[in-house]
Image (tube, grey):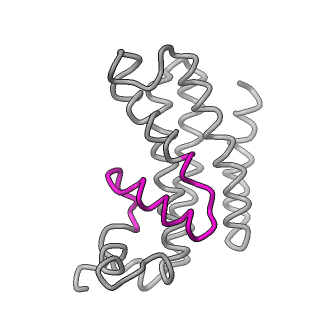
Amino acid sequence: MKSKIPLIEKNKEGYIKVRLIECLQEVELSLLMLKEGFSRNSAGKVFMAWKAFISALVVLNLDRIYRDEKKKEWYFKTGFLAPTTGLKGISQRLEDLGYNVVDLTSTALALHRYAYNGVYKGASDYSDRTEAINDILHLIKEILRLLKEYFKDKWSQELEEHYKRVEEILKDL
């Protein structure tokens, strides 16, 4: 396993913290874009927030997420980044470990398609913009709930400040 990212090996806790901050920043941007009427941009940002969230969960469970040496190598080289093409499988594995993320990953992937394709028939999971906005808000609320549940041992004052800022913006919508 020569191509591991050194950051994970040297500072797993630091990597998790950075991804959680990224998650909250992407949620904040998503809400601000939604507030301005840019639902597709908002969908893209909440998707990126979800990827950061899943990445943090993978690293949190890096010692037990893989089932064999081949998968171990993949998680250490690529899987910890939560690549879009592997998001479903990663989420299924996290679900096996007790994290309820598969359905939310499906929602995040639908929002990802919406961000690129809008509501065009056959290229989107949504028939109108309102459906997508409802899913954006649903995913954001679930991210906020799960952050405190799954990362309570990693919580810090810095994360709390980002979290509170997001909560304030959410109240205004």
Q: Is residue 138 above or below residue 58?
A: above
Closer-to-camera residue (69/37): 69
Q: Position of residue 150 (x, y in %)?
A: 68, 64
Residue at screen point 46% across, 33% down: 111
- Taking depth in this image into account, of 7 and 51 the one nearest to the observer is 51
Question: Where the N terminus falls, by quadrant?
Answer: bottom left
Q: Main secondary structure of the magenta part?
A: helix
- Quadrant assignment, res 41: top left
Q: Position of residue 125 (x, y in %)?
A: 44, 26
Give residue 97's quadrant in the image.
bottom right
Residue 115 in the image: state x and y as whole percent: 40, 29
Left or right of 145 on screen, residue 94 = left
- Up the image or down, 84 lies above or below 56; here it is above
Q: How many marks?
A: 0
Residue located at (68% from left, 55% from top): 146
Residue 12 vertical placement versus 171 (above, below): below
Q: Residue at x 48, y 32 (%)?
A: 43
Residue 113: within the magenta? no
- Where residue 7 appears, as percent x and y from the top left, is 40, 77
**Residue found at the very far left of the displayed protein:** 2
Q: Is residue 63 above or below residue 145?
A: below
In depth, the one of 74 and 7 nearer the eye is: 74
What range of the chain is rendered magenta?
Answer: 80-104
Direction from residue 110 to residue 75 in the image, left or right: left
Q: Residue at coordinates 41% horizontally, 84% vertically from top-left?
A: 9
